[in-house]
Amino acid sequence: MSRQQANKLAVGVLTVVAAIVVIPILLVIVYVVWQGLPALSWAFLTEAPRNGMKEGGIMPALLGTILLTLGTAIVSFPLSIATAIYLAEYAGDNRLTRWIRMAIVNLAGIPSIVYGLFGLGAFVLFMGFGTSILAGSLTLGIMTMPVVISTAEEAILAVPQQFRTVSLSLGASRWQTIRYQVLPHALPGIITGIILGLGRAAGETAPILFTVAAFYVPELPRSIFDQTMALPYHLYVISTQVPGMPLQIQYGAALVLLLIVLSFTLVATLVRTQMRRRREW
Amino acid sequence: MNNKIEVREFSFYYGAFQALKNLYLDIRENAITALIGPSGCGKSTFLRCLNRMNDTIRGTRAEGQVFFDGRDIYAPAVDVVELRQHIGMVFQRPNPFPQSIYDNVAFGPRVVGMAARRSELDRLVQESLEGAALWDEVKHRLRDSALDLNPGQQQRLCIARTIAVKPKVILMDEPCSALDPVATLSVEDLMRRLAQEYTIVIVTHNMQQAARASHYTGFFWLGELVEFNTTENLFSAPKAPLTEAYITGRRG
């Protein structure tokens, strides 16, 4: 086989393999849209489930997921950004920072059900928050921290060193330099990380299973110490726990969840593209 | 004339490597002092020791004293952040922030808290741009991005940004090496005017530039200050054979 033929073969094989990877993703999306679209309506999004959840909509679960996503952002954002700034700007290479980095890598690899059990032990029982939006948000917040920290640190390190040097040479303090010359340029990257983290938080079932999610509550939550329904868990419930559940409602709920998670990814991608276009150095 | 900076028994190390060896040197007030020498001779390292920018590099160590207006800037109690406000720096490549012309100049005064009111800041920005001979070219587009300026204008903007915090000393690290000859001459003109108000130390590769623009010249070789004299004497009657070899182009 000549070099040209080998080259053609390699390109061909790689193209086919890449296409195979895309097919399942497309199939999942197409199938869920095809099955779920007929169920979608304004009423489906704004009404509570009725008649043993076999009729009505998904509003309490949808609202619960929105609340949990907000709660996750409030927990994860400050801790992750502060950690990323510390690691990128202040921390040297010593035993403490190696421990911190190792902890972050390991946090990223922990199965989500373990976060759920940890949340149950730490927040629900030990701290006495009960099964609540607070406990769920804390659990999801901790779960999203590794990805937010890593992307934020990367974004901070990508800011050219000379901005820092010039700023310091003008009599700015370390913190002023970070605040006015580093963070503004790193912000799009940081936001991308947060959105990706939130997208994951919105779609996870295991961490909320023991910490916040309710099988069915007729009322909406009134405080952060209340339980709430949440879309991923609701989907699990109506798919496996309720006999005689109409397929349409199941796929409708799945479609809404899919759209929420995909829109997070889409927004993150858009922010990143904007950032690349606007970058001026 | 007074000495603005006096360097005594000064050595500097990158880890185990000694980059500067036991330097003695006086920088005169309101004069331009040029530092010349081949690449790696330590002249840029020395420049960055004068405003302690080398502090930001891990594993470096300084010995000896550098007196600025009589105070040792390496003494433990020195506030480095405040020191850098008094000893400003202009870098090799024009490096404005990717912000507006106005915000570039206003950054220093803002962070050190020099202008409480908007009108004061406006005036400070104008004075600084006038001081850097850039005002007439940019006064109608202060809100435009600094990156739209040509390299010569950008470097004068960086000088304006440096003088906006009213330093006493301006350190220039090969400020013309990225500029064409016309822009180079305009920056040299500017330096001569600035020297009436500021003390300037410039590192340059370009011996013609040192000869044209400076009052005093120091010649560095392998981390040592081989010779220091008025520019006229150093170029017309070098005492050390090494200096003569370098300025006549036989070494370096």
Image: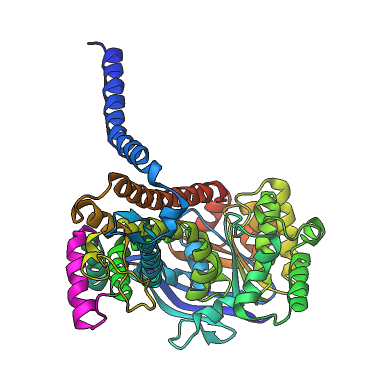
Q: Nearer the viewer, residue B49 or A137?
A: A137
Q: Nearer the viewer, residue B150 or A271?
A: A271
Q: Tell whether B184 sits left or right of A139.
A: right
- Tell me residue B187's x, y (percent): 71, 57
Q: Relative to B52, does residue A276 appear above or below in the rendering? A: above
- Most common SS among magenta residues: helix
- Tell me residue B15's x, y (percent): 32, 67
Q: What number of labels is visible?
A: 0
Quadrant of the rendered structure where residue B25 is? bottom right
Image quarter (top left, top right, bottom left or bottom right) of the N terminus of chain B: bottom right
Q: Residue furthest top?
A: A1
Quadrant of the rendered structure where residue A93 is? bottom left
Q: Residue at x 49, y 61 (%)?
A: A187
Any part of residue A185 in sight? yes
- Tell me residue A213's x, y (percent): 27, 67
A114 in the magenta segment:
yes
Q: Nearer the viewer, residue B55 or A101?
A: A101
User: Which stretch appears magenta?
Assistant: A108-131
B84 in the magenta segment:
no
Q: Residue at x 73, y 53 (%)?
A: B185
Q: Tell whether B73 sits left or right of B121.
A: left
- Tell me residue B18's x, y (percent): 36, 66
Q: Residue at x 17, y 69 (%)?
A: A117
Q: Tell whether A161 sits left or right of A93.
A: right
